[in-house]
Amino acid sequence: MTAASIENGLKSSARATRRARMLRSLLPALSLALVLIAIAWLNPRAISYFGFSLMLNLAIPIALATIAQMFVIAGNELDLSIGTFVGFVGCVTATWLKDAPLLGVVILLGSIGVYALLGALIHLRNLPSIVVTLGMSFVWQGLAILILPKPGGKAPDWLLALMAFKPPVIPFPIIAALLIAAVVHFGLMRTSYGVILRGSGGNSAALKRAGWSLLRTKIALFALTGLFGVLSGMALIGITTSADANIGNGYTLLSIAGVILGGGEFVGGRVSPIGAIIGALTLALAASPLLTFMHIPPDWQVAANGAILIIVLAARVLISRRER
């Protein structure tokens, strides 16, 4: 075998690897495009300003919850309490934040502090995050029921006005999704501290040797999870106008699925803010509009979301094998 043939083989292998990586990164966008094409084929009138406003009505809180879950996954952890936490925030927003704004703000800030303490506890005691957050899910659920035993309350007027905003040309959910993706992508992927946060999940030993505190990074990741969980709960109440202790229970699985669908992985600190937002939008569109247009009963919606996730993961595995 000549040197030229070896060089050509290496070049072709490198090109194949680049193509596989590009296809892997484009997989979330391809999934969203396929869902949009299916909706356009089933109901062309849905592809309009009014149609997107209706179909993506709940996309903003789902996207914020997905970003919250993404920060935990970036540190090789998992949060099983984000759904009930969103419900707790919703109850606080519809009651104390409406009737006693100062007290409501203090409680919401305190809940973010609790999330930061959870990160410290998990790191210092080397506890599995799944167990700790599962236990906290019952705590958040109980607090939500104590605050609002039955559905009710009302969102603050300023929050209702914000979530009802209708900009020209582009629907508000799309603008909000783009803004969230841009801000989080810049902070996590383009700043030096974002590299440190991702490094805590990617290579914690190297980060520790470099002199960075793993405790602080874990606290920061969980605090960011709490922050975006608060924003998700507030956005959800701004859309629904009232609260329920169980209103966010489904967001735990949706947030995990959104991160994985967007290219994230449970190990290695591999996450993508833009991909997570795309995954959240895909789930928001596939959860109700697409299945409704296909005349599929609501009881099958969760199964359909699971099927979409399995298909995307299978495609990712095939791409990864080709890349290797």
Image (tube, rainbow, N blue to C red):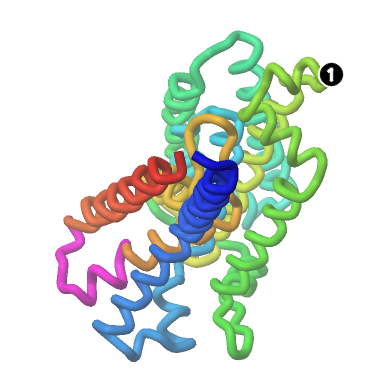
- Front-most of 87 and 120? 120
Residue 94 appears in which quarter of the rendering?
bottom right
Q: Is residue 233 visible?
A: no
Residue 41 in the magenta stretch? The answer is: no
What amino acid is labelled 1 in the image? Gly
Give the SS element for disc 1: loop
- Front-most of 273 and 55? 273
Q: Is residue 161 left or right of residue 312?
A: right
The residue at the far front in this view is: 2
Q: Tell me the magenta residue range.
A: 287-299
Q: In the image, residue 167 lies at what x, y percent?
A: 63, 84
Q: Residue drawn 72% across and 41% down?
A: 106
- Front-most of 20 and 234? 20
Residue carrying label 1: 211
- Front-most of 201 and 323? 323
- The overriding secondary structure of the stretch rendered in magenta is helix
Q: In the image, residue 247 lies at what x, y percent?
A: 40, 51
Q: Residue drawn 49% across and 60% down?
A: 26
Q: Is residue 312 left or right of residue 79?
A: left
